[in-house]
């Protein structure tokens, strides 16, 4: 397993360098228009905060600079990192939709563009290696699946200063603790997971469904209740911690749900 882990680390480093090389080459107008520009467009954000639109254009990739690397959700994560949840403007209300652990970790490591991209990628790779070693068999297929995992197009979000990378790592730590029957490790991972993104209710439901399935087999009510309580405890603790922090700054116990009004096109129980 140690040998396979070393190979995965080398593959991760090599693919990161290849990704950056391709990204750098596509900044050149001749290379872009001769290759990717022939079959695909890029998208740009035009206008201001009050009135904007996203349009499709053919243009080379942009260089990574301090002025252009924080866009979309990264803007809100950066604001939470710098100011927490303090404020009264619209952006203050919007950032209540973003959970605090990633901005706190980002602030502690004190990294800025472009190193924050490398930091997010390292967190992602560490989490992916943990999952791969947990479910894989340490053979060539394991390494192949790990490599495919890095190359999926959706992995782009794990390069960015988003919470996705820490979300994956914390979940991998929780699973490792669960599989190895180390409750302390599971609690730490699950608690961190609940502080990273608001998906805790989904995973609590999944755990409850799994335990209910096992209960049908063993029919031990006391064991079922104990297992469910132990597994749910860190998720509940994390959810309540975030709720308390957001209540402290906003005065609302439903601050996260209140903020969802800024994304009216998306689904949600509390979305008007």
Image: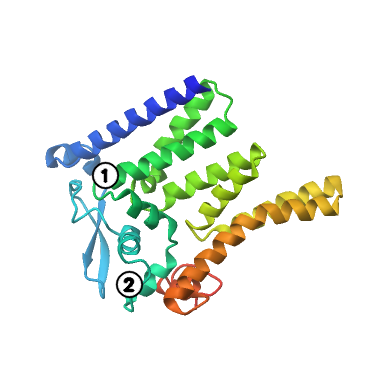
Mark 1 lies on residue: 115
Q: Is residue 269 left or right of residue 256?
A: right
Q: Residue at x 28, y 58 (%)?
A: 71
Disc 1 on helix, strand or loop? helix
Can you see residue 201?
A: no
Residue 89, above or below 236: below
Q: Residue at x 46, y 36 (%)?
A: 149
Q: Residue at x 36, y 66 (%)?
A: 84
Residue 223 position within the rendered picture, expressed as x and y whole percent measured from the top left: 81, 50
Q: Residue at x 54, y 21 (%)?
A: 139
Q: How is the image coloured?
A: rainbow
Q: Is residue 35 left or right of residue 199?
A: left
Does label 2 or label 1 sit earlier along the sequence? 2
Residue 85 position within the rendered picture, expressed as x and y whole percent measured from the top left: 38, 70
Residue 262, above or below 210: below
| Residues at marks 2 and 1, CA–CA distance in whole angstroms | 25 Å
Mark 2 lies on residue: 91
Q: Is residue 16 left or right of residue 113?
A: right
Disc 2 on helix, strand or loop? helix
Crowdedness near tag 2: few (<14), some (14–19) or many (≥20) residues, C-alpha within 10 Å = some
Total labels: the figure holds 2
Can you see residue 142?
A: yes
């Amino acid at each position: 397993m140690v040998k396979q882990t070393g190979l995965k680390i080398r593959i991760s480093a090599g693919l990161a360098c290849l990704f950056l090389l391709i990204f750098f080459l596509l900044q050149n107008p001749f290379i872009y228009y001769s290759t990717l520009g022939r079959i695909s467009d890029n998208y740009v954000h035009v206008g201001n905060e009050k009135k904007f639109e996203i349009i499709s254009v053919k243009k080379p990739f942009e260089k990574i600079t301090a002025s252009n690397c924080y866009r979309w959700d990264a803007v809100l994560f950066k604001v939470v990192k710098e100011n927490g949840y303090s404020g009264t403007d619209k952006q203050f209300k919007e950032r209540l939709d973003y959970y605090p652990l990633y901005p706190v970790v980002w602030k502690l490591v004190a990294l800025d563009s472009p190193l924050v991209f490398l930091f997010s990628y390292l967190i992602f790779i560490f989490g992916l290696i943990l999952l791969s070693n947990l479910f894989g068999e340490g053979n060539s297929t394991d390494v192949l699946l790990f490599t495919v995992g890095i190359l999926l197009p959706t992995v782009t979000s794990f390069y960015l200063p988003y919470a996705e990378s820490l979300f994956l790592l914390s979940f991998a730590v929780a699973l490792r603790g669960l599989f190895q029957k180390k409750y302390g490790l599971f609690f730490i991972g699950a608690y961190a997971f609940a502080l990273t993104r608001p998906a805790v209710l989904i995973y609590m439901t999944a755990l409850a469904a799994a335990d209910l399935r096992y209960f049908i087999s063993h029919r031990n009510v006391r064991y079922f209740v104990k297992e469910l309580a132990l597994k749910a405890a860190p998720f509940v603790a994390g959810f309540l911690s975030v709720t308390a922090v957001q209540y402290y700054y906003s005065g609302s116990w439903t601050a996260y749900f209140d903020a969802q009004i800024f994304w009216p096109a998306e689904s949600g129980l509390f979305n008007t």
